[in-house]
Image: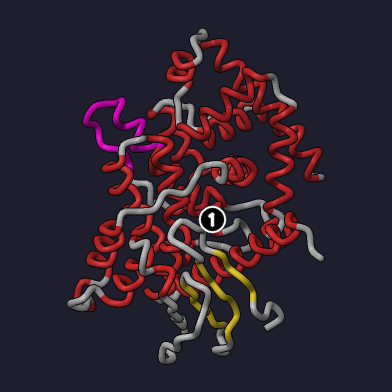
């Protein structure tokens, strides 16, 4: 009898395969496939975006932009390089972070984030085996985050999940800017070493 | 071309993905990534490694008008008076009473096969076919609050 974790892993792999097929069809201009891709992924992206801005109206507009980008640039997606959800979350986070930073800078217009390089940010170092290995990656990340100091871990997770800048984090954590920067930089160095060890990466 | 030490390159890539940089640094890096494949690789590595953190965030149902706006922009001429199959689909996403009684099969092939109703225990089922029109995946949802589940029917196909 398969374990619950094994069953969840199988579900996750099946979901990735469905999403990959939907993305493939979307790239060929299949609007129904795109609709299904939206139905299966938009709640996750919307949650990620709301976590960063907590401003629903902006998130609605940004989510619309993200999926228009996905429709137009679906042919840029390379399944051998990243899972569909990583690609989509990357686009959504980049767009939301760009918008968020632009709010702090007054009325200056942000550069559009539809450039191929912005869309290719999720590309480059994954392969199909890695794609099917998201459960392991999650476990490695959790284990490696555990190895950081509480301050390093808190700063990194708050930054990623809520989109805080260095300055905002310093205020949020009632610490000096230099201290927060150091937590993050040292924490990320340690995290990378640990992730490379865990994943057998060089 | 700006010279970056390997350490600085890695730190900038990680912080770019983390999102802690100011607007100006972020904009400069976005441009730099365009020219610098090695930096782009580092950024990609961090995106992939940190992606599981996003899964800690609870999905939030999207308001139906977002999709309607997208549909209107991309397919304005093809919109049906009733909103088409998507609006029908939205019924189960947003109503609590009807969803459990609905059974809907949508086959994503060209040409589309006629919809077939099958008895299921509540929720919605969609069948996704492969290129040979063979059912390949079952996508289902047991209730409006439950996540969409995907199940491979014939992975070897």
Q: Which residue is mark 1?
A: A85
Counting labels gives: 1
Residue sitting at 47 percent across and 67 percent down? A75
Residue B68 shown in magenta: no
Above or below A191: residue A94: below
Above or below B83: residue A116: above
Image location of residue B91, percent across then percent down: 32, 68
Q: Is A57 positioned to the left or the right of A154 in the image? A: left
Q: Secondary structure at mark 1?
A: helix
Residue sitting at 51 percent across and 66 percent down? B142
Q: Is B78 positioned to the left or the right of A186 in the image? A: left
Above or below A74: residue B84: below
Image location of residue A13, percent across then percent down: 66, 63
Model colouring:
secondary structure
Residue A104 shown in magenta: yes
Given residues B58 and B55, the one toward you in this image is B58
Given residues A160 and A7, the one toward you in this image is A7
Residue sitting at 47 percent across and 49 percent down? B59
Q: Which residues are magenta?
A: A97-111
Packing grade of label 1 (10 A; few <14, some 14-19, many >=20) is: many
Task: Indicate the quadrant where residue B86 lies.
Answer: bottom left
Q: Chain of mark 1?
A: A
Q: Is B44 positioned to the left or the right of A47 in the image? A: right
Image location of residue B30, percent across then percent down: 45, 39
Task: Indicate the quadrant where residue A35 lies.
Answer: bottom left
């Amino acid at each position: 009898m398969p374990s619950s974790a094994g069953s969840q892993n199988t579900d996750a792999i099946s979901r990735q395969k469905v999403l990959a097929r939907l993305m493939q069809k979307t790239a060929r201009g299949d609007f129904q496939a795109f609709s299904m891709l939206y139905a299966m992924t938009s709640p996750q992206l919307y949650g990620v975006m709301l976590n960063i801005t907590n401003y629903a109206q902006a998130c609605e507009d940004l989510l619309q932009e993200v999926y228009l980008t996905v429709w137009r640039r679906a042919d840029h997606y390379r399944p051998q390089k990243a899972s569909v959800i990583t690609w989509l979350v990357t686009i959504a986070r980049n767009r939301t972070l760009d918008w968020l930073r632009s709010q702090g800078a007054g009325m200056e217009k942000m550069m559009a984030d539809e450039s191929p390089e912005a869309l290719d940010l999720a590309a480059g170092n994954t392969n199909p085996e890695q794609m099917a290995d998201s459960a392991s990656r999650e476990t490695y990340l959790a284990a490696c985050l555990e190895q950081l100091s509480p301050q390093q871990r808190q700063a990194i997770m708050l930054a990623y999940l809520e989109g805080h800048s260095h300055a905002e984090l310093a205020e949020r954590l009632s610490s000096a800017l230099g201290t927060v920067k150091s937590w993050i930089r040292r924490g990320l160095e340690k995290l990378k070493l640990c992730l490379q060890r865990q994943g057998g990466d060089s | 071309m700006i010279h970056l030490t390997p350490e600085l390159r890695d730190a900038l890539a990680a912080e770019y993905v983390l999102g802690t940089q100011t607007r100006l640094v972020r904009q400069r890096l976005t441009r730099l990534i365009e020219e610098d494949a090695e930096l782009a690789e580092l950024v990609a590595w961090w995106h992939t490694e940190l992606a599981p953190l996003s899964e800690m965030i609870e999905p939030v149902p999207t308001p139906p008008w977002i999709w309607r706006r997208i549909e209107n922009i991309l397919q304005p001429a093809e919109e049906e008076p009733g909103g088409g199959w998507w609006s029908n689909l939205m019924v189960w996403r947003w109503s609590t009473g009807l969803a459990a009684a609905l059974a809907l099969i949508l086959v994503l092939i060209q040409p589309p096969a006629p919809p077939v109703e099958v008895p299921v225990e509540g929720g919605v089922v969609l069948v996704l076919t492969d290129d040979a029109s063979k059912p390949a995946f079952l996508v289902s949802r047991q209730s409006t609050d439950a996540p969409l589940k995907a199940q491979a029917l014939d992975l070897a196909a």
